[in-house]
């Protein structure tokens, strides 16, 4: 059976039967090596090389006429608009070539971002189109492709009829040059294009997060404090009716209403703290995080080492990042101790939360880590999770630093960590021990 299988494999190799890997290029996997018997990949490369010439002649003629007419008429009122419209056509030509390369060469290139006019009016539209780097690179692609296709078309045709045993290697070499041109001239322009795409994603993330926060606040008000206040109003109404008939029952109702008022006030305070805690505004991250750690079910050591407070937006993001991470420590880690560190490194605010729990945390583990990473990424932050099975778990987050308006770089305002290492549980001795154990590398 083994000898027969080996014989059959040799027969398949010599007869040119495609293996399962030979059709994998459409998914971006490594191309199979060329061989004498033509495979589907080689046939697609040959078709691409043979269609280069007619499409190249057409594109070259259109682009040449457009450039000559546009530049020649640029002294008139129609020259510059003609150039602008031609650049839009070049964008569409590039889209066609990307689709052809994706289908025949297995090259997948991202589509460039659409143009956005900075301002209103015709001249703003015209200037945006005239300085479009994507359109100009597509026009350059049309110029370069014609002389190259004049070389590749006859060489491919002659190889097909006369040098067919070497055709797979010839087609692969010529097609690789085409692949390089497509990637170099038809891809998104540069880092700016990628940055635009990232900002669009970040804007959507910020909008979704803000909408979710508003829904959460509305739900908490409706189901919590509002329901208690309605019950309070009804109880006081009944007490008012019984005040003359049954003073003792009325007194009991008023006493119950007093308890409801306390609970409603506590829920409102918790809700306000969830929106933006007052201690963070008044005293800064050091005291705010110490207060936050005091509500954690695990003893937490807090170390905040900053010479000044960051901008309020960055300060709030840092606070709620630590808050969510400490909630995960309480709910999922099974840890005995935890530690929170914040410090500034040049233009970045670094946050590190670690615990000695069971580990095994993942971004897709359902603990909110993925959403936290998305929210940090929406403000150019970085989120790194290191949680091997068995622990410990270490989460490192970075935020861009922005100075608070009205504070100098050398002055140390209150609340940024005048007591840089405070043990939320365990007193000052644990804080001093944590201070000695602090690593100097940051």
Image (spheres, helix red, strand yellow):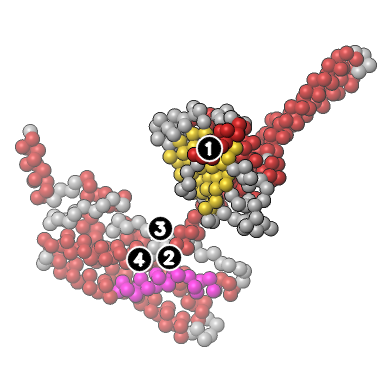
Q: Position of residue 432 (x, y in %)?
A: 56, 37
Residue at 11%, 65% (x, y): give it: 163
Q: Earlier in the sequence, mark 3 or mark 1?
A: 3
Label 2: few (<14), some or many (≥20) within 10 Å?
some
Magenta span contains residue 133: yes
Task: Give the residue displayed 54% in from the left and 64% down from the top.
Answer: 116
* SS for callout 2: loop
Q: Earlier in the sequence, mark 4 or mark 3?
A: 3
Classify residue 250 by image quadrant. top right
Q: Nearer the viewer, mark 1 or mark 2?
A: 1
From the top left corner, tell me how far across and down residue 338 is, in percent.
52, 34
For label 3, the SS is loop
In the depicted structure, whether residue 86 falls above or below residue 249 = below
* Distance between the alpha carbons at the discs numbered 4 and 1: 53 Å
> What residue do we see at 46% from left, 39% from top?
394
Quarter holding the N terminus is top left
Q: Nearer the viewer, residue 407 or 54?
A: 407
Where is mark 1, residue-wise? 434
């Amino acid at each position: 059976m083994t000898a027969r299988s080996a014989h059959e494999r040799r027969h398949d190799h010599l007869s040119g039967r495609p293996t399962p890997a030979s059709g994998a290029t459409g998914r971006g996997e490594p191309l199979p090596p060329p061989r004498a018997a033509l495979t589907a990949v080689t046939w697609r490369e040959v078709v691409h090389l043979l269609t280069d010439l007619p499409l190249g002649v057409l594109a070259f003629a259109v682009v040449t006429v457009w450039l000559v007419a546009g530049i020649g008429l640029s002294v008139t009122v129609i020259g510059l608009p003609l150039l602008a419209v031609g650049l839009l056509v070049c964008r569409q030509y590039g889209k066609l070539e990307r689709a052809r390369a994706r289908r025949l060469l297995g090259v997948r290139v991202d589509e460039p971002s659409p143009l956005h006019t900075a301002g209103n009016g015709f001249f703003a539209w015209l200037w945006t189109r005239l300085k479009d780097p994507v359109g100009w690179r597509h026009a350059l692609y049309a110029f370069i492709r014609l002389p190259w296709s004049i070389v590749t078309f006859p060489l491919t045709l002659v190889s097909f009829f006369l040098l067919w045993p070497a055709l797979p290697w010839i087609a692969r070499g010529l097609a690789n040059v085409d692949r390089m041109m497509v990637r170099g001239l038809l891809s998104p322009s540069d880092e700016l294009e990628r940055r635009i795409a990232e900002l669009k994603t970040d804007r959507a993330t910020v909008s979704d997060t803000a909408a979710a926060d508003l829904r959460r606040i509305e739900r908490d008000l409706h189901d919590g404090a509002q329901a208690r206040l309605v019950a309070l109003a009804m109880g006081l109404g009944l007490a008012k009716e019984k005040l003359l008939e049954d003073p003792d029952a009325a007194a009991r109702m008023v006493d119950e209403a007093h308890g409801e008022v306390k609970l409603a006030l506590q829920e409102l305070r918790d809700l306000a703290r969830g929106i933006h805690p007052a201690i963070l505004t008044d005293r800064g991250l050091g005291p705010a995080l110490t207060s936050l750690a005091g509500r954690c079910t695990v003893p937490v050591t807090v170390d905040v080492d900053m010479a000044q407070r960051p901008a309020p937006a960055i300060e709030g993001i840092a606070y709620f990042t630590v808050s969510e991470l400490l909630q995960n420590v309480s709910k999922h880690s099974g840890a005995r101790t935890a530690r929170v560190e914040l410090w500034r490194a040049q233009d970045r605010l670094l946050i590190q939360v670690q615990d000695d729990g069971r580990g095994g945390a993942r971004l897709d583990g359902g603990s909110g880590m993925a959403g936290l990473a998305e929210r940090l990424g929406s403000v150019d932050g970085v989120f790194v999770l290191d949680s091997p099975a068995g622990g410990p778990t270490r989460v490192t987050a970075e935020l861009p630093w922005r100075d608070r308006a009205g504070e100098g770089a050398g002055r140390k305002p209150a609340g940024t960590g005048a007591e840089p290492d405070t043990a939320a549980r365990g007193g000052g001795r644990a804080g001093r021990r944590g201070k000695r154990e602090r690593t100097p590398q940051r």
